[in-house]
Image: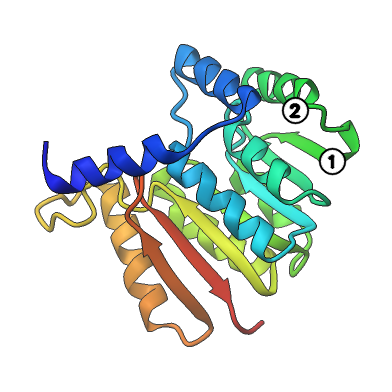
Amino acid sequence: MSDQELNWKFVDNQVIESDGIARARQVSHELGVEPVSPAIGAQLAVVTAAINAESIIEIGTGVGVSGLWMLQSARRAVLTSIDIEADYQQHARQAFHEAGYPSARTRLITGRASEVLPRMNERSYDVVVIDADGASVIEYAEHGLRLAKSGGSVLIAHALWKGRVANPARRDDTTSAFRTLLTELGKSAAVAASISPAGDGLLHVVKLTD
């Protein structure tokens, strides 16, 4: 195991997940859904807590792992979460209920993100989380920046795409999409962006101007 892999494992192992998150993670693995890593979940919690987020929209509900992390840290936030899989969202709804979050704090929308996002109000969210189809990450990031308030954060999971983004020999559509997104954000004066190598990578973009 390389030093980098040891670092990833060490960082993940330092995170203590609540019983509710641990249960949701287990269900996620049983269903074959890849949740955010514990280290990325903790980073989502830190960002949402740091800006005292009250409105969060998430692309990719899964079974609620990332949502649980953010709800426990942003204690006044309302989470809107979009996923095409109604069955997964039912598990997420149950996880939120078992964790004690009232239904008024969560809004689950079943549908294709590409169809739902254009209907969402722009400049309305403190935090936008993107954890969905990697090949569509550029489209989702554009929507995310439109939906985020000035000073809001767009958080994009799996930004290193299984270690492939850093390898120039990898040229599949998803890897290329993440690489292009990183390049374009680096050129933009409208955002500040940074990527964490924890887990599978978390890209944090702050919207500076409308």
Q: Can residue 122 be seen in this view?
A: yes
Displayed quadrant of residue 60 = top right
> Are circles 1 and 2 on residues that touch, CB within 8 Å?
yes
Which numbered tag is attached to residue 105? 1
Q: Can residue 127 be seen in this view?
A: no
Q: Residue at x 48, y 54 (%)?
A: 156
Please give left or right for residue 61 compared with residue 106 in the image: left
Percent x, y for residue 144?
A: 60, 61
For the image, the number of numbered tags is 2
What amino acid is at disc 1? Arg
Looking at the image, the residue that sits furthest to the bottom is 189
Q: Name the residue under label 2.
A: 96
Percent x, y for residue 150?
A: 69, 77
Q: What distance separates the C-alpha of mark 1 from that of mark 2?
A: 9 Å
What amino acid is at disc 2? Phe
- Observer-nearest residue: 34 or 83? 34
The first of marks 1 and 2 along the sequence is 2
Query: Mark 1 packing: few (<14 Cα in 10 Å), some, or many (20+)?
Result: some
